[in-house]
Image (cartoon, coloured by chain):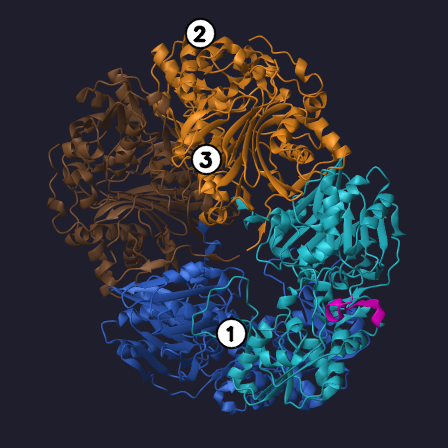
Chain colours: A orange, B cyan, C blue, D brown
Amino acid sequence: MATPIPSTDYLPPAAAANDRPREECGVCGIYGHPYAAKITYFGLFSLQHRGQESAGIVVSDGEQIRQHKGMGLVPEVFSEEDLGRLQGHLAVGHVRYSTTGASHITNAQPFVATHRGSTLAVAHNGNLVNIRSLRDELESQGSIFQSTMDSEVVVHLLARCLDMELDQAIVETFRLIKGAYSILLMTKDKLVAVRDPGGFRPLCLGRLNNGSYIVASETCALDLVEAQYIRDVEPGEVLIIDQQGLRSLHLEQNQPPSFCIFEHVYFARPDSDIFGINVYQSRKRMGEILARECPIEADLVMPFPDSGNYAAIGYAQASGIPLEMGVIRNHYVGRTFIQPTQSMRDFSVRVKLNPIRSFLENKRVIIMEDSIIRGTTARSRVQSLRGIGVKEVHMVISCPPTRNPCYYGIDFPSCEELVANQKTVEQIRDYLDLDTLYYLSLEGLVEATGAPAENFCKACFDGNYPVPPDRDFRKNVLGCGGSTLACPGRKQ
Amino acid sequence: MATPIPSTDYLPPAAAANDRPREECGVCGIYGHPYAAKITYFGLFSLQHRGQESAGIVVSDGEQIRQHKGMGLVPEVFSEEDLGRLQGHLAVGHVRYSTTGASHITNAQPFVATHRGSTLAVAHNGNLVNIRSLRDELESQGSIFQSTMDSEVVVHLLARCLDMELDQAIVETFRLIKGAYSILLMTKDKLVAVRDPGGFRPLCLGRLNNGSYIVASETCALDLVEAQYIRDVEPGEVLIIDQQGLRSLHLEQNQPPSFCIFEHVYFARPDSDIFGINVYQSRKRMGEILARECPIEADLVMPFPDSGNYAAIGYAQASGIPLEMGVIRNHYVGRTFIQPTQSMRDFSVRVKLNPIRSFLENKRVIIMEDSIIRGTTARSRVQSLRGIGVKEVHMVISCPPTRNPCYYGIDFPSCEELVANQKTVEQIRDYLDLDTLYYLSLEGLVEATGAPAENFCKACFDGNYPVPPDRDFRKNVLGCGGSTLACPGRKQ
Amino acid sequence: MATPIPSTDYLPPAAAANDRPREECGVCGIYGHPYAAKITYFGLFSLQHRGQESAGIVVSDGEQIRQHKGMGLVPEVFSEEDLGRLQGHLAVGHVRYSTTGASHITNAQPFVATHRGSTLAVAHNGNLVNIRSLRDELESQGSIFQSTMDSEVVVHLLARCLDMELDQAIVETFRLIKGAYSILLMTKDKLVAVRDPGGFRPLCLGRLNNGSYIVASETCALDLVEAQYIRDVEPGEVLIIDQQGLRSLHLEQNQPPSFCIFEHVYFARPDSDIFGINVYQSRKRMGEILARECPIEADLVMPFPDSGNYAAIGYAQASGIPLEMGVIRNHYVGRTFIQPTQSMRDFSVRVKLNPIRSFLENKRVIIMEDSIIRGTTARSRVQSLRGIGVKEVHMVISCPPTRNPCYYGIDFPSCEELVANQKTVEQIRDYLDLDTLYYLSLEGLVEATGAPAENFCKACFDGNYPVPPDRDFRKNVLGCGGSTLACPGRKQ
Amino acid sequence: MATPIPSTDYLPPAAAANDRPREECGVCGIYGHPYAAKITYFGLFSLQHRGQESAGIVVSDGEQIRQHKGMGLVPEVFSEEDLGRLQGHLAVGHVRYSTTGASHITNAQPFVATHRGSTLAVAHNGNLVNIRSLRDELESQGSIFQSTMDSEVVVHLLARCLDMELDQAIVETFRLIKGAYSILLMTKDKLVAVRDPGGFRPLCLGRLNNGSYIVASETCALDLVEAQYIRDVEPGEVLIIDQQGLRSLHLEQNQPPSFCIFEHVYFARPDSDIFGINVYQSRKRMGEILARECPIEADLVMPFPDSGNYAAIGYAQASGIPLEMGVIRNHYVGRTFIQPTQSMRDFSVRVKLNPIRSFLENKRVIIMEDSIIRGTTARSRVQSLRGIGVKEVHMVISCPPTRNPCYYGIDFPSCEELVANQKTVEQIRDYLDLDTLYYLSLEGLVEATGAPAENFCKACFDGNYPVPPDRDFRKNVLGCGGSTLACPGRKQ
């Protein structure tokens, strides 16, 4: 009967208040549908890969605003009954990615607050890089904070402008904010989508059969609810949808686009079109270009499902080396696990992915991986293949070495933990116990997208950060020390 | 695996934001015990009768502040594991009373917020009567609100003074606040107890075996944890407990005491000493005085367990009429219930309390009740007794007619729903289908406490409100219309 | 989503298979009501005091038989949806009492099995005393057993006779069975109630408004569903209810009645009429007779709620010593508990029942208890009273010393653990740290019931067992050694 | 706190008692490991694809037998704590496949019963075809049944022979039993594996590092626990493992092997070696042979992940047509689902598998499916591809038309629901709205396994049943009418 908040909240001491890793997220909003909450539910369900920690939907019927949030996956958080209570034609939803052990319901989004009788809900994907100074400024004026979310800061800033018209209030607010944000705002009768001038994170607009609007992080959300894709929300655009229809403002732009190229490498779903490019095809091309850049003699090329699947197909087709699915995924792996016994040394790999001994024994194998972060997973996988008698293990990576932290919403580990920040490619190859190791070149990666290099933020590979974060941000938020920005991408 | 917030939150439209009924609550705080969270848990467990909707504990080890809150009873919200995570020597806890259908985790206390790196936790029992103007003022300065709790306003006010010393900040803050409050505040290294100058709600101080301090709503919390009662926190007193020990400030007092006499009638536990008076004994004396004021000829006097038990004992002893326990309580009644079939007409009474037909048939029975609010429960009970052939049903009430709403923390229904506000005693007697109905006089009630009449707030009986609420409060918070204050106590 | 059986089942090794303590239980059956399952639910709810471990209902619509069982209290086991699925006009239900740590779903009743296309459900209250030899006999003919329940043996026996007419099959079956049983049997279109020739356990028949029949362990079940009491099922009676109405057979009776007097002392609900006698009144008379047999000079007489309440009222009225409710019950005590800290010495008493220090200090107190089994609880209670300064503690017990195990369905601890089997009254008084200790005499107890002494089984007091159990039963089931029957009731 | 059995059990009327579809299952047993339950847990986890409805483990420490069963997936049923309680060196486990809406805890295995002090646990994969006559015979001798499981019959039969030596008892028992069975039996100190003379279902023996034995349905279970494969349990073999080690008996064999070829087509995991043949490789060869038998001109070949993956790889490699992963699987699909809105017509396909519009539009696509049962899923998939503008949709099936029910443990729908029993291939092609449809020939399928045709049961394709079922079995168990055996495989 009781429903305690699951994990005991940890409220960090003052100095560390912004010291936590930030997360990728997914957002979805609907305007004009009688079952706005239900459509949002399915949108979030399609975006589940962008965040599995918590989910929330806030809905308005034009008068009253209702919300439901919880820890867990979308189908776990919402029952049919919950959705039935969320009546209204206007909704915003959010899924959040868990990267740390502690999961806090107080950090679940959308963030909702009331100010002078107006209720505002905010769902945010991205990372603000001047969050510390904004928060200091707000606190010096008396604001108090209940969470560590960027969204709470956004609402505080908006509250200060709410004696202006909404349009002006938004422009004034976002003038102060620096960083990556694809944000959905909701009042009791308006849905507002805002994308930062760099457009780091994707955000697209679609239309449902009944004429209602949907705004979502990726186009795969539109597919499930059978909405038609209209266009991306543009970098620096403010899209306001209400009874008058849809209108568009633009934030001052003195900034070129900075699309996150890592969305194509790893994060987005392959059936989405991100920044106008289909992800399945860009990933396949990464494999094709790798085959051209890094030819290897081997018996077969093989992904560890599913992340390397698409580049592996490209590599196989371009190289003529047969593609095989030599490891079998266990589809029943859940989140809680019984500890194995001591004799089960390869447990962490095999519990999910079992390599087929009788097929792989004595073969020369190329493994396709989308990226290497810490290297620990890749290492276990190689070890597991060596253990069943694979003759040669080669590895190809469908992006360059990941050497730098992201300030714009992807939660990489600290520099010290990024294996490519600490080791040369040769050292990594030795560490992973590989016969050969090849990374795709940055030029090859850009070529795979088919778009010009200057459109992308490639900071995790080359260290060039389009929007410099506050000094404190680097130090406190990312825990990489003051010299992070200078941490030089090493040559391959 | 998922732990959704149970009920779908309802965020009211602007005008109605303060329109909800307020609640009684219980608070408990510990300073200086290695298992502060566990002691607080047991304190809250003893105070469960003051609030069954939600429970929360916030704890500090001097550096970090941790919290755990949930919907439900204390033993449902906290597991041994949860308490294990709440490490620290300093804790405040809160139980909250559910009066409305909607229960919101966002309204669970203690309320916790961060301001310039300082974390504050607030647990509140009582009701602020100028909450609306305080909130308007704060919002005009840019504050945003996430809940409808008084505690959130208190934290906002405190945040504005936190560049002062804590002592001064508290005095400045509470200078602005009007109404009833027994509040516990916690910073990372201090426990602060504040009681309003009228002292509406009880708050007492005790000491555990190891020398640590406990502050709690009622003395029954001290009994369970085997703490020794020291004294009540005085009206208008600010008690600060930290490494330097215990020190006391006083808010400016231009106000006599206004102890809530209804705590003695109904709310407090009979084993507590409230305002220095043992509740068991004051209730028993109410029955004795009733026997003197209202003699009735009958075969037996009988409570509906357990609320009328103690006054019934007093009545029986003073009148010589035998006390009987003629209705049997079912101890397994839970909170969720299956709908009865149509044939089960007396279900709502009998599922909890079954009158013994073979014993009560043809008897003349006096029922002792502590109070009558809407009258619906009493009516069903009388009906159920008539149904099994009781010959005469008399009812005596151990307080005067409850005619007026409470602005200080007890959640009575609106004037329209208070049966004694709408009907004369004679009309009530007819409505309840009683042979006779007697209420204890206000003088008799005061006499039962053994304290002077001027010590008490008796507004629910006589309409004299010691601290006048803001006009908006009456209108918006209580929903009784502008004329509420004037709603005249009718003569019996 | 998954619903594992909660506790890990323990299947005992061969020799110990019958070595477990047996339980009290409650049964309820309905014939002819369109909501038979729901009525049974409420009947079981009223009988919850007879068994809190598990609950089950089996229902038939004349063609199909459906069941639902679970561990826990009745409202926890059944949801409105579960009851909705249990469609039919014919139902039997069962609640089971947990006395051991291990609770097994495989032991939940009603027991259901199929034989040659006939489904039988059996709900049983009582204890068979030749269970071991019956089971040996059945196993030698090839039967296998999945539980340790008496009901499973009954079904096996019935299965062997099912080529006879049902009437004859029942008579043949119960001819073989010795011991105490109030059993409800259900086929797809018949409800059968069987009570053993001694009538150890109660079983009564009633009629609902729509003419449908109810058979239940106690009359309180009839009260809640507003059924009219018709009569008790007689000792040795077989009551068959089907489309033809109600008919009655009689098992061969060479046995006088052996009503369990302990049902009146402790087990039955005070609002029930058991063996034709109202329990509230028999308990009150126990107190009156105690006052006559054992006068004590004291300031007050006080029960520990609720078990001693009724005898305490009788004692107070007969002696003129005032009745007080000097200990306050915490109504929120659940089943799982957090371990107290070391400093909380009186925790086990106070968590449920807090004595009022300011009222009891320096008083001479008589405590009324219904019985003393191990003595440990009584000892803690006395200690707790001594701790708050009670001047004299006297104790009166509303039955004689409980010296012998029960073979007929009440689960007393072994002889070694029964304090009155091991110590004289004087030794018990010393052990409990009492000023005086008095037990009601056996004659007084019988007088309180108003029925002749020869109607009752009083074996737990006097060691005269009306139906001698098999030798193996004593040894294996009760764990009291071969000399149990001889264990002599010591003189007071 | 309460843990009700989740679904309301349905006990069928007599005539229908054996009328339910039977299930595939997985079994795993351990002898000689200190953490036998934990190893069994991981074995079952690897076999989860063979049964997702319920899971159970029974364990013995040589003296006591303990069990834990529950509804749901293996990780949902067992907690670390549950496994901790299951102490012993000897264990058998079972997973069961849910094919019907009703899931019953009473049907969860291993089945456990006690007879004359001996406890037997039985875990069964397969189907007995003379179950009805065995059960009739047992019931005529007085047996009662609590479930509809074959295992219960096996235990009854064994109980009748338990005065013999175990070896003889097993031989005597299985002499009576006809059909498909890979059974694990456990007594308190012995693990026994029995495989029917046809060897329909797989069963293999392995050895763990510490010398302990494992017996499991598939070799993938051995991989996860890092056991070494020794050999298959042979058709007609009885393997007894106890303190004396391993010894082998043989049931009388007058029967050639009848390995289930459908295990290779669909059921077994591709990383298992089944009947000595690696499943990944046999499935890939099915695709290669299909490419040879049925050449199609198209732009790409594509599986609907994951079932058609391996044959698709074979087809692509043999035909030179590129393999693509044109539909993207949503990995977060759970078991309970919110109903879609009316506008979401392709919901049932897309919620799991979203075809990539921008990639597939205007392409000529070959879909590889492992089999077509009812045809409804395939039809939705084709529709969904047509809807996004795929130009041509061809389908190839890696087995012949599935025209006949299985009597040996795979739960196909009834003849009427098997699309290939009701329609010609051309009619199926029209029904599915395909451009072309090809099935692999039976000869091609056998060739893909590399084993002689006479080794296999191919009844689902050719209607030749190696072990004829009882007449009643066909009629009552399978619901296909008396003429089922005659239902002629139609020509393609």
Same subunit, labels 3 and 1: the answer reads no
Q: Is residue C476 left or right of residue C165?
A: right
Find residue D411 and report its horizontal and vertical position in percent. 26, 44
Residue type, mark 3 in image: Gly
Q: Quadrant of the C terminus of chain B?
A: bottom right
Residue B339 visible, this orientation: yes
The quarter holding residue A479 reads top right
Q: Seen in the image, is C36 located left or right of residue A173?
A: left
- Which mark identifies residue C410? 1
Label 1 sits on a secondary structure element that is loop
User: Rounded to the nearest whole Å, what is the CA distance between mark 1 and mark 2?
Assistant: 83 Å
Q: Which residue is mark 2?
A: A293
Q: Left of B179 or right of it: where is A109?
A: left
**Circle 2 SS class:** helix
Q: Nearer the viewer, mark 1 or mark 2?
A: 2
Q: Which mark is residue A43?
A: 3
Give me the chain letter of mark 1: C
Q: Is residue B454 magenta?
A: yes
Figure check: B172 above or below C411: above
As helix, strand or loop, the secondary structure at mark 3 comes to helix
